[in-house]
Image (cartoon, rainbow, N blue to C red):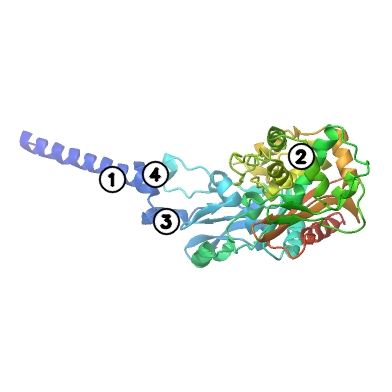
Amino acid sequence: MSKSLQRTAAAFLLAFLLLALALGRWSIASSDLIVRDDNPRRVFEEQLIQRGSIFDRNDQVLAETVPQSDTLVRRYPFVAAASLVGYVSINYGAAGVEEALDRVLRGPRDFLDQLLHQRQSGQDVRTTLDSRAQQILSNRLTQPGAAIVLSLPDGAITALASHPSFDPNTLDQDWKTLSTDPAAPLLNRATQGLYQPGAIFQTVLLADAIERGVMLTETLAQPDRPVTLDRLTLNCARNDASPATLIDAYAQACPAPFADLAAQLTSGDLFALTQKWKLDQPPSLEIRTSAAPTLTTDLSTTLALQAYALGQGELTISPLRMAQVAATIGNNGFMPAAFVVKDVQSPDGQWQPYANSAETPAPIIDPTVARAILQAMRVQGSSAGHGGAAFSGERRHSWFIGLAPADQPRYAIAVLLEDAANATDAEDIGRGVLEELIVAP
């Protein structure tokens, strides 16, 4: 072969090599191209991922990937768990456990897997959710609001409901309606909804009063009198009997004695109390949570102090955080760290505990104080609890926190109802759920 032919052949080989390298870079190594939403290859590959399943604590399937035509689709057989399990969509992203454990559920995929076009396969996830408890809670929560049940002493989420909710099986078809609905069905009200605490803040004030040595059984002057805050007048949530003491006032959610306690405090005292109970912090949880921004209210007047202490100030709280307040009372003063992922499956198929489930409970109040509050809560049937109203403008919400069984709590609950007809509506739901839970299936 002549030298000119050799040079020509070498030039062609070099050109082919450069072309192969360029194609490899654009088809595999270019991360910008791969993640673009309009990349049809990415969409096709997403539809072929054998995403891991999500189970409840008893291995009931909450989410799974099943074949359909030439692709794989995500199926949610237990729609009642949608607010917690969430969804995953090529078009609209992910939420809930689907979002939080996305890397585990999708599984690993390295450069060699991409080069050899190996099918991506993920690991399964087991949650703390109890499907029986979840169905009980969902059946009872039929109006806008949220409720959450924690098990004691570990803080595992046993059930969580947000109403209105959605069907993740038809998310893509329903997205426009869901995303523009003023009722916000895609919002997880239990973990991200923020509401005035109203009468429910009395539990925190009562704990502070006990620590400061206030006599709970001392006879008070007109503990059931109304309290006026600007144009808002607050009354007792219940009128079972004429209250005489601070314990009586707490049982009936009467605001006057707590307004009197607030008048003895400073803004620093109230803010410190808020921080002590972690009410200004987003709860630690695998899925998204919220807390109110840093407090800036001027509490330089008695009226401002009372408004804040009666739960009608700047402070807003999520139902999840209030469930942890209840859990602290039932857990001898230690606030358990809520968690929803129990364990995950390793590549070899073994279940391994998830890291978040081992977080140590935080000491909040002395055990004697916790027991005193538990005894002060109104007992009805097998549950102990505290409920009342909170006002947001012209809207009245209903709150309840409870524990069951009343003598040795195994469950803590928080219920929030928006635009409630009565201050005790949330209590009726919460106690009903607790009574069903403690009955053996």
Amino acid tagged 1: Leu
- Residue 156 visible to the viewer: no
Compare residues 227 and 245 and report the one nearer the observer. 227
**Number of residues whose C-alpha sits closer than 10 Å to that of mark 2, classed few (under 14), some (14–19) or many (20 or more):** some
Q: Earlier in the sequence, mark 3 or mark 1?
A: 1
Q: Earlier in the sequence, mark 3 or mark 2?
A: 3
Compare residues 78 and 174 and report the one nearer the observer. 174
Please name the residue that numbered disc 4 is placed on. Answer: 115
In the image, residue 275 above or below residue 241: above
| For discs 4 and 2, the disc positioned in front in the rendered view | 2
| For discs 1 and 4, the disc positioned in front in the rendered view | 1
Amino acid tagged 3: Val
The numbered mark at residue 23 is 1
The numbered mark at residue 43 is 3
Please name the residue that numbered disc 2 is placed on. Answer: 263
Amino acid tagged 2: Ala
